[in-house]
Structure formats: C-alpha cells, structure tokens
Image (cartoon, grey):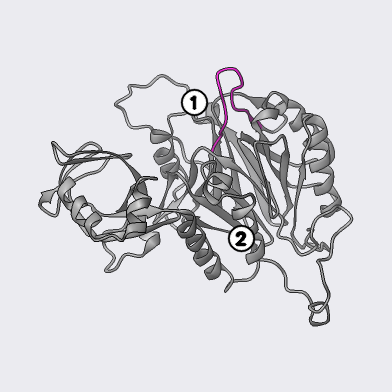
C-alpha cells in the first residue's frame, strides 16, 4: 500500500516478485514499489532468496533503474517477506522502499569499518563512530561465514552509541549460503559474497522495534554462583544440574515434552530492576547438561552474579509473545512502514504452516475500513494486487537477528524482530 503523498508527506511501499529469474523478479518487485510510491525513492532495502544470490548484481541494477534510490542495501536468505506473505524456500525478491522528507540515509560496509585489518584475536574490536548526532538507527546485514558476529555486534553497539540518544542496531545474518552458493549482499549498485553492509538512518523519523523471543519462563530466578566461560556450575549455591532437575520436577507432562525440542536459559540484561518481565531476559540455548559434573552448557559467555531463569519455547508461546508485543504497539499511531526479520527456524517448521509472523504483524496494523464498508465481504485490492489497507512491509528469514534487549542489541535466534517507522 502506498501512503498518500502530497507535498512533504512520507511514503513507503513494498513489493515482491516471485520468479526464478533474478532480473524478472526484481523488475516485478521494484515496479510494484514504484507504482505505489508514484515517484523515485530515497532508500530501498532488498531481500532475495538464496536461489537468486548469483543474480544479486542484476537485482541491484534493476532497483536503481526503476526506483532511483539514493541508498540501497540488500541480503539473501532462506526466504523473504512482503506484506502478509512469506516466501520460504522459493525464488523471490522483496523490496521495501521509502521517500521520507527530513530523513537522510547513508550506507557503509566492512571495508569502511576496517574489519579486514589484521588484529590480534585477543584485542577488543573497535570501530570509529558510525553516523551523525541525529542517528536514529543502523541496519546491518552480514554474511555469518565471513563475519565474526560475536565480536562485531558489540563493537557496532559502541560505534553507534551517542551521549544524548539511543540509536538502535538492527538487521540480521544472511541465511542459506553454502560453499557452492555463498550468501550475497548488496550495497548501492554493487554486490558481494562476504562481509557486511550497513544503512544509517538520520533525521525526523522515529524507529522502534519489538523483539519477540517466543519463550516463556519456568521455575524461579537463579543467581549464578559458580561458572566458567559458557558453563554454569552452580545456581543459587546448588549444583547447576540439580537445580535444573528441581525445576523439571515441577513441570506438567506437556511442559516436560517441550524440553525435548529445546531448553533455553534467559539472562537478565538489567540487574537493577526490581521485577523482571519477558523482555528483560536475553534468551540463549542450553547446549548440554553434564550430570557427572552437574554442569550446564549455555550458548553464550556467562559470569558469576548474573540472574538467570530457564525457558521453554513452542508455537503457542511464540504466537502469544508476538501478539502481546504487537498489542502494545497499537496504542501508538500506525507506522508508515515496517521491516520484519524473522528466524529461518520459525515459519512452517515452527508453526506448521506459512505466513504466520507476516500475517500477525500485518493484521496488527491493518487500517480499519469505514463503517459502511464493514458489512461488505472481502477486502479492497489495489491494481498492483496488494490489499489496499496492508502495511508496507518487507523482510527475510535470517540465520540470526539483530535487535535490542535492554539498552544494547544482540544476535538473537528463533526471534521475530519487527521494526516500525513513524514520522516525527
């Protein structure tokens, strides 16, 4: 859907081309965006299936020819999102384009950051400051096979931080890349098969995000009393595995069955709060339990003194969590556009059917029809084939999602990260 544009009103659009030929798919998607914008774009974010990675250069050329954007970034993945639809394991190009008066966009990549400069692995990674004082957000898309995200993401957090504001780091990891067909990235008119690309957003736009980790807590909070690297040895003074066993003993039969699908642990990101809700935990996978040592391995570095709580995840919980976060957003003015970056382990493999996350987000911000139209069957469809009241949204299925938990962004897994743009 195009936001009506007269004068200095912002406009966003999204379009998708589902075609096995990269040029044809990009032409369809970019043409849909142009039809809805009615003019050239300031920025475009391009998401394309791994099957079209070889054609990333052609996709970039088409986007510039049809939309004429000043800034373009793009990434390949296992699938793409457009509006209320998800295209998993199918060739498609999805484009989000916008024209935003009073907003500036600039791009960068790993070479600008000096990421390729040889460094001692033990030295902390530091980047020069990214963006200007009025930076609102930074999107980064990275190839996980060539970028050490465990070091890069904390360094990016520090590089965008400002004393008088809190820009947010967003984005995700390319997915589906192999030795024979590596992931692909787009910056401007060029494409590449490794590294990262970034987009800075400055000016009169409010960029907000929700990160749905899709988990629910079980058992009480524990303080880690003994640990080493990523291994928890004691929780609340008890052997870690023994503490976990006590939690499991309190679960019902259905909850115990979920453990076989994966057990998670949430680490509190702000220890100074009096109470901890779902959003206060950074979720990490339990990667192993050694009953001999009574130790628990976690997919992250941990330390003594941190507060943690065990968590479970299933489709019902993931649905409930995303719905709760979206409900809180409906108290605000509707966004003019959105980006959805969802994990490649969600979709059909988690929910048993397509379009779950995209449909939920689209419905949450669907414009209510006029009273006389409520009695009419069906929905209004634009000439480009999209529902006329649908939020302009695009995105992709990532191998890891970048989004905030507390005052910093992290690499998440199994999450749905929704970024919303509202004009100031």
Q: Nearer the viewer, residue 214 or 112?
A: 214
Residue furthest right in the image = 383
**Side of 280 relative to 250 (left or right):** right
Which of the labelled discs sits on residue 275, or is there none?
A: none
Residue 284 falls in image quadrant: top left
Q: Which residues are magenta?
A: 173-186
Residue 112 falls in image quadrant: top right
Query: Dominant secondary structure of the magenta stretch?
Result: loop
Residue 297 falls in image quadrant: top left
Q: Nearer the viewer, mark 2 or mark 1?
A: 2
Task: Name the quarter where the N terminus is drawn.
Answer: bottom right
Residue furthest bottom in the image = 371
Q: Secondary structure at mark 1?
A: loop
Residue 83, visible in the rendered structure: yes
- The residue drawn where x is 52% and y is 70% is 328
Neighbourhood count class around disc 2 (C-alpha, 10 Å): few under 14, some 14–19, many 20 upward: some
Task: Check disc 1 and report the residue beneath it.
Answer: 145
- The residue drawn where x is 55% and y is 65% is 326
Residue furthest left in the image = 237
Q: How many marks?
A: 2
Residue 165, visible in the rendered structure: no
Q: Nearer the viewer, residue 32 or 125?
A: 32
Neighbourhood count class around disc 1 (C-alpha, 10 Å): few under 14, some 14–19, many 20 upward: some
Task: Check disc 2 and report the residue beneath it.
Answer: 360
**Side of 73 relative to 149 (left or right):** right
């Amino acid at each position: 859907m195009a936001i009506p544009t007269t004068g200095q009103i912002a406009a966003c659009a999204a379009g998708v081309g589902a075609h096995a030929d990269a040029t044809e798919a990009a032409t369809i998607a970019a043409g849909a965006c142009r039809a809805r914008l009615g003019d050239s774009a300031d920025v475009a974010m391009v998401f394309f299936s791994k099957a079209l990675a070889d054609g990333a250069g052609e996709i970039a050329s088409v986007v510039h020819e049809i939309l004429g954007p000043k800034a373009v970034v793009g990434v390949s993945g296992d699938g793409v999102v457009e509006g209320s639809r998800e295209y998993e394991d199918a060739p498609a190009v999805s484009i989000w384009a916008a024209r935003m008066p009073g907003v500036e966009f600039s791009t960068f990549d790993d070479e600008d950051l000096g990421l390729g400069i040889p460094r001692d692995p033990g030295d902390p990674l530091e980047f020069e400051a990214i963006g200007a004082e009025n930076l609102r957000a930074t999107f980064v898309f990275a190839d996980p096979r060539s970028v050490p995200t465990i070091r890069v993401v904390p360094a990016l957090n520090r590089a965008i931080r400002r004393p008088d504001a809190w820009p947010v780091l967003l984005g995700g990891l390319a997915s589906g890349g192999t030795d024979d067909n590596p992931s692909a990235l787009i910056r401007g008119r060029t494409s590449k098969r490794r590294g990262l690309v970034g987009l800075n957003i400055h000016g009169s736009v409010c960029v907000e995000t929700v990160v749905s980790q899709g988990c629910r807590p079980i058992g009480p909070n524990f303080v880690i009393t003994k640990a080493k690297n990523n291994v928890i040895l004691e929780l609340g003074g008890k052997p870690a595995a023994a503490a976990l066993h006590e939690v499991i003993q309190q679960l019902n039969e259905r909850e115990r069955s979920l453990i076989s699908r994966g057990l998670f642990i949430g680490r509190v990101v702000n220890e100074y709060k009096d109470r901890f809700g779902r959003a206060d935990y950074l979720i990490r996978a339990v990667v192993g339990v050694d009953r001999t040592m009574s130790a628990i391995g976690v997919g992250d570095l941990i330390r003594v003194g941190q507060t943690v709580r065990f968590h479970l995840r299933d489709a019902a919980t993931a649905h409930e969590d995303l719905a709760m976060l979206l409900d809180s957003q409906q108290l605000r003015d509707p966004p003019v556009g959105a980006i959805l970056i969802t994990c490649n382990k969600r979709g059909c493999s988690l929910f048993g059917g397509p379009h779950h996350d995209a449909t939920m987000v689209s419905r949450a911000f669907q414009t209510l029809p006029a009273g006389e139209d409520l009695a009419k069957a069906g929905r209004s469809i634009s000439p480009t084939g999209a529902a006329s009241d649908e939020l302009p949204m695009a995105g992709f299925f990532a191998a890891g999602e970048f989004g905030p938990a507390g005052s910093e962004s992290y690499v998440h897994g199994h999450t749905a990260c929704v970024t919303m743009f509202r004009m100031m």
